[in-house]
Amino acid sequence: MPLNVTPVTPVFGARVSGVDINKPLNDAAFTVIRAAFDEHLVLIFSDQPMTDEQQVAFSERFGPLEGTRGVNPGSGTPFARQSNLDIKSGAVIPADDRRMFYQKANYFWHADSTFKAIPSLCSILTARVVPPAGGATEFASTRAAYDSLNEKEKAAIEDLVIEHDFAYSRGLAGFTFTAEEQALMAPVRHRLVRTNEANGLKSVMIGVHAKCVVGWPEDESRALLDDLLARATRPENSYRHQWRQGDVIVWDNQAAVHRATEYDATQHQRLMQRTTISSGAVANN
């Protein structure tokens, strides 16, 4: 079967079939995948159960991996672990455990690692253990949000810089970092408008980590960021994925946002392994 890319919505997202991403990819196949990523922002691969080693190898085709640190259950590994299972024992993590409370902020619309000095290019999430109900992931296009602006509005935001703050976003979920953790998470600044170098298409890098527009009053800043997020997450610009074991999804962290949805973590097991690929571009202050 030839490699095939099939859109899942008229706006963004595509299913990719006819390729085994668990095997080393030749350059021709990866060129098609990378072009589809640049065009569609979210790529879905079904029936591709991965080991950790296979996920790392596939991820590294997109660029260098970020490491994971802090409170995430996968801290100290290449993976950000989205799970209610203890990484060492495999036992279900109690609901009142700090590691589970930390993950509640994933229910907010966000893009991974915008709070880091070097923002990420993309993330890759693999479904290892899937609950029988709930636990879907929703995606939305911030390229569509940019495209919805008129020319005057686009010109007004072209040079804006946004402060992204991980402590701020986790605080919205009621989570508090220790002083030692907080010291590693200073706010960073990035340009709001992003341009895809492959096709010249623009998007806005937003989400819950985006705290404020640098130099703007708080109310005006919040109004703009909320408006852009509302544009991105309109139903016609959104896609909800109900996971099946063996699913793999790649998404653009500079042109899309995503959020987790709830599942019964006391009754069912869930294990998702996420790798995040650095853009290699330093912050613009």
Image (spheres, rainbow, N blue to C red):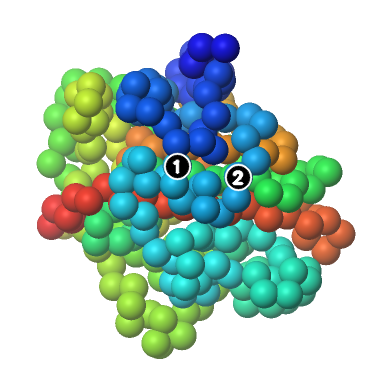
Q: Examine the image and state in which quarter residue 201 appears.
A: top left
Identify the amino acid type marked 1: Phe
Name the residue beneath numbered marker 1.
58
Q: Is residue 185 above or below residue 181?
A: above
- Coordinates of residue 134 in the picture (x, y in percent): 76, 44
Quadrant containing the N terminus is top right
What residue appears at the point 60 percent right and 45 percent down from the top-left corner? Answer: 50
Circles 1, 2 touching at the beta carbon (< 8 Å): yes
The CA span between labels 1 and 2 is 10 Å
Q: Residues within 10 Å of mark 2 (few under 14, many from 20)?
A: many
Q: Amino acid at mark 2?
A: Met
85 vs 21, left or right, is: right
**In the rendered image, the vertical position of residue 257 relative to residue 89, given as above or below:** above
Q: Which residue is mark 2?
A: 50
Going 83% across and 56% down the picture, which residue do you hit?
268
**Quarter of the picture holding the C terminus:** bottom left
Compare residues 32 and 155 and report the one nearer the observer.
Answer: 32
* Residue 64 on image: x %, y %: 31, 52
Few, some or many C-alpha atoms within 10 Å of disc 1 (few <14, some 14-19, many ≥20)? some
Residue nearest the observer in this picture, 222 or 86? 86
Provide the secondary structure element on which disc 1 rests: helix
